[in-house]
Image: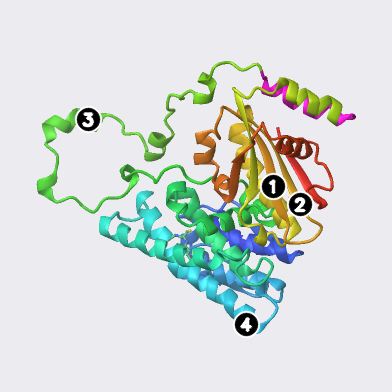
């Protein structure tokens, strides 16, 4: 019998669902027509979980509640528990850490703002302070590591990442998480692993903390009641839901790059030339590039990944670069890039070349694509022939590159 999860999908079901992807051969079905607040309050459900919370796992041997326990059951006997007693202990350590130091604080911050709990300002401040303390500790630990325990994904990575997912999606904006760059890198590396992304899909970091308008406020004292006559008309007007308020279309500001003086270089022409050149690449594409290049309207940049020592697993490194290019989608109209993953064996080096509209790296790219700060950026000096030759080699994926084989070359166009 397949395992059956009683719940709608959420970060707590993801824990078991992702674990099942890693274990392989485990089928988890979500129960049909689950209705939150109804299905989990029936006598049958309360027999499986007397507190009436989801998820609950139904197996041929019995039922289990608590999402971490369910994930442990799915992962039992697999390498997700590491390869030694100490690794097992450390995996459990991080699972508990994330439940108490991350999950509880993220929930304490997010749920009142979404209207699921009463909002109390000092309580929120405590949750945020607790969360920052937990993230700072995790950040220090991850400074020199790709995974929490050992050299591969374990149940600790699955549960810690799922517990942070709600935070990244709901309350932890880029300006909040940028204090914890190793946590950011770790989180995006994890959610872009194929076994994660198959379950959680594309993850977008929230751009704003939900406004208090959607939060449940503590009961107002009678003397604070608004003056009835003045507010009557207002009160009769239908109030937009918090979500609607947030989603109300804002006038779209023009990208400052669209206001730059016109350039003789048409980015799409270059991208077409690059894609369509199948032979004599040097003579056709590279020569064409320099013929059309406009140093007034565009700039060229080398980038160098700052944490190459962490690139110990080839597919993780390739996924990391793939994720970066996906997140650069916002710059498609204004950029072209080549990313090389270099070396025959780990640690792999990640280096790139980018062409951006304008004389600097566009500010919106720096602000909105968190990966940018994981690289050192150096403007190409066009008066230096050696640098121009390096540009050529990167555009044409020349191998060997700087004396080493290429593991992969990816193009952003
Ligand atoms: N520690 C539990 C938390 C479960 C939980 O809070 N579930 C929420 C939905 S995400 C729920 O069922 N709430 C309904 C309720 O409180 O009645 C777990 O990890 O499974």
- Residue lying furthest right in this view? 279
Distance, label 3 to label 2, CA atoms, is 63 Å
Q: Secondary structure at mark 4?
A: helix
Q: Which residue is mark 3?
A: 234
Of 384 and 208, the residue lying toward us: 384
- Confirm or deny contact between disc 3 and disc 2 (CB under 8 A): no
Q: Which residue is mark 2?
A: 342
Q: Quadrant of residue 75?
A: bottom right
Q: Is residue 92 above or below residue 153?
A: below
Distance, label 3 to label 1, CA atoms, is 58 Å
Percent coordinates x, y for residue 151 in the rendering = 69, 69
Q: Which residue is mark 1?
A: 351
Quadrant where the N terminus is found in the figure: bottom right
Percent coordinates x, y for residue 193 in the rendering = 67, 55
Q: Secondary structure at mark 2?
A: strand
Look at the image and give the residue range highlighted in magenta.
Answer: 265-281
Q: Which residue is mark 4?
A: 86
């Amino acid at each position: 019998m397949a395992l059956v999860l009683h719940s709608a999908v959420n970060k707590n079901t993801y824990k078991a669902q992702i674990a099942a992807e890693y274990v392989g051969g485990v089928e988890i079905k979500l129960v049909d027509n689950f209705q939150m607040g109804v299905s989990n309050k029936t006598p049958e459900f309360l027999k499986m979980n007397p507190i009436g919370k989801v998820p609950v796992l139904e197996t041929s041997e019995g039922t289990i509640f608590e999402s971490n326990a369910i994930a442990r059951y799915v992962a039992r006997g697999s390498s997700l528990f590491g390869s030694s007693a100490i690794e097992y202990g450390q995996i459990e350590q991080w699972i508990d850490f994330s439940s108490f130091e991350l999950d509880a604080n993220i929930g304490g911050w997010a749920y009142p703002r979404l209207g699921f709990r009463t909002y109390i300002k000092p309580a929120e401040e405590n949750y945020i302070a607790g969360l920052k303390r937990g993230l700072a500790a995790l950040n220090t630990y991850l400074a020199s590591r790709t995974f929490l325990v050992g050299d591969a994904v374990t149940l600790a990575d699955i549960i810690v990442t799922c517990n942070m997912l709600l935070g990244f999606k709901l309350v932890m904006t880029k300006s909040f998480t940028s204090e914890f760059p190793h946590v950011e890198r770790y989180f995006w590396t994890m959610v872009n692993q194929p076994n994660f992304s198959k379950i959680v899909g594309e993850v977008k970091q929230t751009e704003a903390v939900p406004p208090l308008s959607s939060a449940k406020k503590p009961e107002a004292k009678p003397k604070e009641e608004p003056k009835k006559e003045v507010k009557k008309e207002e009160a009769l007007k239908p109030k937009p839901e918090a979500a609607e308020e947030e989603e109300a279309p804002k006038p779209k500001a023009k990208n400052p790059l669209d206001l730059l003086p016109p350039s003789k270089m048409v980015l799409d022409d270059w991208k077409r030339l690059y894609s369509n050149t199948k032979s004599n690449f040097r003579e056709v594409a590279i020569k064409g590039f320099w013929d059309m290049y406009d140093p007034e309207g565009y700039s060229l940049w080398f980038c160098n990944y700052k944490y190459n020592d962490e690139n110990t697993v080839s597919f993780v490194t390739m996924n990391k670069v793939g994720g970066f290019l996906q997140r650069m989608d916002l710059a498609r109209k204004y950029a072209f890039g080549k990313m090389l993953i270099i070396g025959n064996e780990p640690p792999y080096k990640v280096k790139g070349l980018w062409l951006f509209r304008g004389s600097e790296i566009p500010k919106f790219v720096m602000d909105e694509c968190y990966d940018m700060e994981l690289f050192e950026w150096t403007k190409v000096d066009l008066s230096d022939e050696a640098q121009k030759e390096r540009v050529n080699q990167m555009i044409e994926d020349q191998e060997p590159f700087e004396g080493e084989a290429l593991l992969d070359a990816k193009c952003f166009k």
